[in-house]
Image (tube, rainbow, N blue to C red):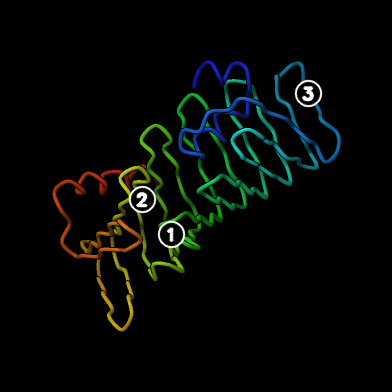
């Protein structure tokens, strides 16, 4: 990650969101002027642009993009497509050294979740964890929650606080800050339980990382 951060300023963002895919060929297609501030080292695409890795099939489109090598990447009107994930967000602010990104207005989809939305989210790339808060809801599985912590590698998720989960005619509900819903994805199916296995308990600790 550090080596790529020195050579390709925007690569750490796309690399992390793509869950470990490696870049070989990287190109930038600005929609307008590309401005470089020599005093601050910040490069700005005020009219946005497209960042593409043809070999790995990754594509990041933003209506506005700015970055500083080895420091940060910020973008608005973000659309990131990879082979398995789709990230749509109003804004993203990626801290390269910390390997963290904060989103507003995020909509996420992958083989497990369809249309997973939240007002704000934090991605911890090193741990492959995404924390979502504020009107969290998903089209599939049918879920509404106050807070959701997703472990992308383990393919499990934990809802904290009040929630509503629907599967067919069955509905699970939890009320109050102590309510919990555990989701496990395997073989195209979702296993939902209000009993959290000990192995998933550490997911609750991540919630405090996003105020």
- Please say if 1 is above or below 118: above
Residue closest to the far right: 33
Question: Earlier along the polypeptide chain: callout 2 or callout 3?
Answer: 3
Per the rendering, the mark at residue 36 is 3
Per the rendering, the mark at residue 136 is none
Give me the residue at 73% from left, 46% from top: 63
Tag 3–tag 1 contact (CB < 8 Å): no
Question: Earlier along the polypeptide chain: callout 3 or callout 1?
Answer: 3
**Mark 3 packing: few (<14 Cα in 10 Å), some, or many (20+)?**
some
- Please say if 95 is above or below 185: above
**Mark 2 packing: few (<14 Cα in 10 Å), some, or many (20+)?**
many
Give me the residue at 48% from left, 62% from top: 114
Per the rendering, the mark at residue 113 is 1
Q: Nearer the viewer, residue 45 or 31?
A: 31
Mark 2 lies on a secondary structure that is: strand
Mark 1 lies on a secondary structure that is: loop
Estimate the x, y position of residue 68 in percent, counting from the top left.
65, 24
Give me the residue at 32% from left, 63% from top: 189
Nearer to us of marks 2 and 3 is 2
What residue is disc 2 on? Answer: 150
> Taking 143 as reference, is 119 left or right?
right
Alpha carbon separation for disc pair 2 and 3: 37 Å
Question: Earlier along the polypeptide chain: callout 2 or callout 1?
Answer: 1
Alpha carbon separation for disc pair 2 and 1: 10 Å
Q: Nearer the viewer, residue 141 or 89?
A: 141
Estimate the x, y position of residue 206 in percent, counting from the top left.
31, 44
Residue closest to the far bottom: 169
Estimate the x, y position of residue 4 in percent, counting from the top left.
56, 20
Mark 3 lies on a secondary structure that is: strand
> Taking 199 as reference, is 40 left or right?
right
Tag 2–tag 1 contact (CB < 8 Å): yes
> Taking 34 as reference, is 109 left or right?
left
């Amino acid at each position: 990650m550090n080596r790529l951060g020195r050579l390709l300023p925007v690569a750490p963002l796309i690399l992390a969101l793509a869950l470990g895919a490696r870049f070989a060929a990287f190109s930038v297609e600005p929609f307008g002027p590309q401005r470089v501030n020599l005093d601050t080292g910040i490069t700005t695409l005020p009219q946005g642009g497209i960042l593409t890795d043809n070999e790995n099939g990754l594509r990041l489109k933003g209506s506005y993009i700015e970055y500083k090598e080895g420091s940060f990447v910020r973008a608005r009107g973000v659309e990131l497509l990879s082979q398995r994930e789709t990230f749509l967000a109003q804004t993203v602010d990626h801290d390269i050294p910390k390997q963290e990104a904060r989103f507003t207005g995020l909509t996420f989809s992958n083989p497990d979740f369809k249309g997973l939305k939240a007002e704000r989210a934090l991605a911890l790339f090193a741990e492959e964890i995404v924390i979502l808060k504020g009107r969290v809801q998903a089209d599939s599985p049918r879920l509404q929650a106050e807070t959701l912590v997703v472990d992308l590698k383990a393919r499990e998720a934990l809802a904290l606080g009040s929630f509503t989960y629907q599967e067919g005619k069955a509905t699970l509900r939890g009320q109050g800050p102590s309510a919990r819903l555990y989701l496990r994805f395997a073989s195209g199916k979702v296993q939902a339980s209000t009993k959290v296995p000990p192995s998933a308990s550490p997911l609750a600790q991540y919630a405090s990382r996003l105020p």
